[in-house]
Image (tube, grey):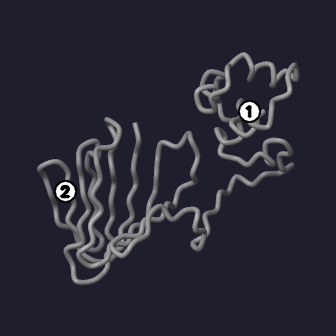
Amino acid sequence: MLRHQRGWSLERLSQLCGVSRSMLSQIERSDANPTVAVALAIATAFGISLDELIDPPAQRSPLQVIRADDPHYVYRSDEHCRIRTLSPLTPERSLEFYEITLQRDGALRSAPHFVGTREYLSVQRGRVRVETGAHSEELRPGDSVAYPADVAHAIVNIGRTPALIYLVDLLP
């Protein structure tokens, strides 16, 4: 059972999918058949398709591949900034991994995230300034920084060329 494999309680699954614990228990015991809407809510909570919930693959690979050209993982793309997520999109994630390209004079400004959230950034190409609260640091290729992200923060390209950055958000 997928819930047991993930170590989730009925309460946890109930919170993630919006289906009552008693209904989930009845479904697990085969005392009730879920509607399509309920089954879809459960599949979404697990981060799988309805097909995978109904007919799970016999030997599912533990590898979760994100292809470079998959548009589902492009979080934002405009003339100033492109953000592509490099981590699976699942509800239970506590870590988010991003590739960010900031064009010349581009900036990524963020409102405070959840209390306790931290970001870890590494510059691959270009020069950027990281601002968090009243503090800032300039970074070059190979530099990295960790900072609180539960306050207003920004990443600003201060170089003459596009900047390539890898960013990890660690959620509380």
Binning the other alpha carbons within 10 Å of mark 1 as few (below 14), some (14 to 19) or many (20 upward) gives some
Which residue carries the number 1 mark? 38
Binning the other alpha carbons within 10 Å of mark 2 as few (below 14), some (14 to 19) or many (20 upward) gives some
> Which residue in the rendered view is the most extreme toward the top?
22
Secondary structure under tag 1 reads: helix
Task: Provide residue 33's location: percent of width, then percent of height.
Answer: 86, 27
Secondary structure under tag 2 reads: strand
* Residue 59 higher or lower than 27, as above or below: below
9 or 35: nearer the viewer = 35
154 or 167: nearer the viewer = 154
Residue placed at 65% from the left, 30% from the top? 7
User: Between marks 2 and 1, how big is the CA–CA gap?
Assistant: 44 Å
Left-right relation of 22 to 158: right
Which label is found at residue 66?
A: none
Left-right relation of 96 to 4: left
Q: Amino acid at mark 2?
A: Glu
Count of numbered badges drawn on the protein: 2
Task: Provide residue 14's location: percent of width, then percent of height.
Answer: 63, 25
Task: Provide residue 53's location: percent of width, then percent of height.
Answer: 79, 42
Residue placed at 24% from the left, 44% from the top? 151
> Which mark lies nearer to you, 2 or 1?
1
Which residue carries the number 2 mark? 131
Q: Amino acid at mark 1?
A: Val
> Which residue in the rendered view is the most extreme toward the left?
134
